[in-house]
Amino acid sequence: MYNIVRIPGDGIGTEITKAVTDILEAAGAQINWIECEAGEATYKKTGNPLPDETIEAMQEHRIALKGPLTTPVGAGFRSINVALRQKFNLYSNIRPAHSLPNIESPFRSVDLVLFRENTQGLYIGKEHWVDDEEHAESIAVVTRDASKKIITAAFEYAQKNNRKKVTLVHKANILKLTTGLFLQIGKEVSEKYPDIVFEDLIVDNMAMQMVLNPQRFDVIVTTNLFGDILSDLASGLVGGLGVTGAANIGDDAAMFEAVHGSAPDIAGQGKANPTALLFSALMMLEYLDEYRLAEKIRSAVYTVLQDHKDECTPDVGGQGSTQTYTEAICKLLRD
Ligand code: NAI
Ligand code: MG
């Protein structure tokens, strides 16, 4: 029995967390959920978007499944997602994008895994006003140590999973010190992996190449903000944010969440696709070495997409709801 912290989150969070929990249960996963709270709804209720009990539960159990958390735009409290990643030094944000069966897309056979540095860059949110709010500045931090950790994680993943190439994405022509350092470390680390092809691309070109020819990419590694943007782009290549899972992994803790946010435009309407959080949960099972269980659930998802399209959510072309889709997967798993 695994003790795992569960944070349902905001917006569609409750709906998709329930769906994923039901699916894991139907598959026979032995999980004791430690129920915790965080996010905007928690803030509105208690005045604190990240309660001490949630941090303490994370400190004790070191593993969490988390729904999306709303972060106010322009003002208000800082991102709790970022706070959790930093607090537990979850430096690897791993975001795979694979083409799925029976989902309309102009892109075929996409199979890439993006590694996003998860604790630094412009995402540290160190900003200040100059000149009486006429001028704002933001600071990006890139350290040798953190860059080495994420780039090494990408190469290790490539080696373990028989991947052939690592593409490092940067903007070292303009941001010569920060992303220049990231690139420099990439070149150093790559020398230890002679069997893996290493290439680097400037981020704007990368965005174009990913749309023009996404099949040329295998493992991608980049800094925090570029990784944020390119992972949404990668999701768009394989059916959208409803189908891409992710993992935040550090040396001694891990938190699993989807690439997407709280999707306020569809919250409470039964339209949310739980596949993204489910795929995150499958990465969690793999982290726990439960590979067979993960494979069994993945195979049920593929079957439902292929043979029960009507029961799937509208974002992937179905006519069903979160509930009909979840039921279809649970039924297959129980049979
Ligand atoms: P979003 O990712 O929530 O939504 C973007 C679009 O994708 C929307 O049209 C939405 O309906 C659709 N979408 C997202 N997830 C879906 C799913 N499971 N099934 C079907 N459609 C789905 O991005 P947005 O609207 O920019 O952000 C909303 C809030 O989420 C913001 O407060 C933001 O800060 C927060 N956010 C939180 C994240 C996290 O918890 N890790 C990550 C990204 C955003
Ligand atoms: Mg994002």
Image (cartoon, helix red, strand yellow):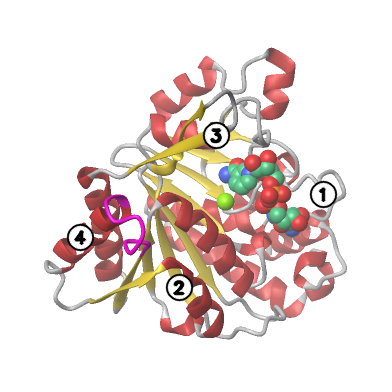
Identity of the amino acid at label 1?
Asp
Are there few (<14), some (14-19), or many (20+) residues within 10 Å of tag 2? some
Mark 1 C-beta closer than 8 Å to ligand 1: yes
Q: Is residue 318 left or right of residue 108?
A: right
Residue 103 occupies quadrant: bottom right
- Identify the residue under disc 2: 206
Identity of the amino acid at label 2?
Met
Q: Residue at x 84, y 58 (%)?
A: 321
Q: CA distance from mark 4 to mark 2?
A: 18 Å
Q: Which mark, residue 135?
A: 3
Does the rendering let one see residue 1? Answer: no
First reached walking from the N terminus: tag 1 or tag 4: 4
User: Closer to the camera, 69 or 255?
Assistant: 69
- Identify the residue under disc 1: 265
User: Closer to the camera, 94 or 71?
Assistant: 71
- Residue 233 lies in the magenta-colored region: no
* Residue range highlighted in magenta: 170-178
Q: CA distance from mark 1 to mark 2?
A: 30 Å
Q: Is residue 191 left or right of residue 221?
A: left
> Where residue 211 sits in the image (x, y, percent)?
56, 79
37 vs 145: above or below = above
Q: Which mark, residue 223?
A: none
First reached walking from the N terminus: tag 3 or tag 1: 3
First reached walking from the N terminus: tag 4 or tag 2: 4
